[in-house]
Image (cartoon, rainbow, N blue to C red):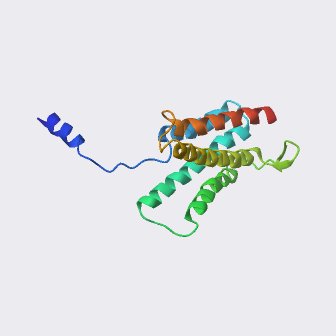
């Protein structure tokens, strides 16, 4: 009888909260950062994925603030900038700031450069997904498109950084 009642309750309409990004991917990126450094992956690539992760945390913070109805001027920009700026905490104990020449045009620490690129790539692919979805009548073109776009873009950027550094 309990199973029957539970099945009936599942049919009732409920409000569903959509997440702005995939939590499985977030956990995978977070866990993979330390492993990548131990395997000898360049710091710029590790920074790239760290920047994307910190941007994702910023998006989740915005989702939380929407849920609590906390709205104020400049909120979205401020939260994203502050979440990406958290990369600075790794320089307080784990990593020494070691600037190098990047593609002959810029002198910056590879982790910091990668984090800024990763954040930018994640933001741009999120905007691209929203645009593509709007052009397709509010539907994704294929399952998990929201996840595939940033992961593929970050993988391509990782490959490019491996060639540059």
Query: Toward the viewer: 70 or 130?
Result: 130
Is the C terminus in the top left, top right, bottom left or bottom right quadrant?
top right
Identity of the residue drawn at 87% across and 47% down: 105
Identity of the residue drawn at 59% across and 37% down: 149
Q: Residue furthest left?
A: 1
Q: Residue furthest top?
A: 39
Q: Which residue lies furthest to the bottom in this view?
A: 73
> Does the image show residue 132?
yes
Task: Where is residue 102? Give x, y as percent.
Answer: 83, 43
115 displayed left or right of 55? right
150 displayed left or right of 43? left
Is the N terminus in the top left, top right, bottom left or bottom right quadrant?
top left
Task: Where is residue 74? Give x, y as percent.
Answer: 58, 66
The image quarter containing residue 125 is top right
Q: Compared with residue 3, is residue 59 higher up or lower down, i.e. above or below?
A: below
Labels in figure, total: 0
Identity of the residue drawn at 77% across and 50% down: 97
Q: Which residue lies furthest to the right in this view?
A: 104
97 displayed left or right of 84? right
Task: Where is residue 8? Give x, y as percent.
Answer: 18, 40
Identity of the residue drawn at 15% across and 39% down: 5
Task: Where is residue 138? Give x, y as percent.
Answer: 47, 45
> Does the image show residue 94?
no
Q: Compared with residue 36, is residue 69 higher up or lower down, i.e. above or below?
A: below
Query: Toward the viewer: 89 or 85?
Result: 85
Q: Compared with residue 68, is residue 26 higher up or lower down, i.e. above or below?
A: above
Q: Compared with residue 127, is residue 7 higher up or lower down, i.e. above or below?
A: above
């Amino acid at each position: 009888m309990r199973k029957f009642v539970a099945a009936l309750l599942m049919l009732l309409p409920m409000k569903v909260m959509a997440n702005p990004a995939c939590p499985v991917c977030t956990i995978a990126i977070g866990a993979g950062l330390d492993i990548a450094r131990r395997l000898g992956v360049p710091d710029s690539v590790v920074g790239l994925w760290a920047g994307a992760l910190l941007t994702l945390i910023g998006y989740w913070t915005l989702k939380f603030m929407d849920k609590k109805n906390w709205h104020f001027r400049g909120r979205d920009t401020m939260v994203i900038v502050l979440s990406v700026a958290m990369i600075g905490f790794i320089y307080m104990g784990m990593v020494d700031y070691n600037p190098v020449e990047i593609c002959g045009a810029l002198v910056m620490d590879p982790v910091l450069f990668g984090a800024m690129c990763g954040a930018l790539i994640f933001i741009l692919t999120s905007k691209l997904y929203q645009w593509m979805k709007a052009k397709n009548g509010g539907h994704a073109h294929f399952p998990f498109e929201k996840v595939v776009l940033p992961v593929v873009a970050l993988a391509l950027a990782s490959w490019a950084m491996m060639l540059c550094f």
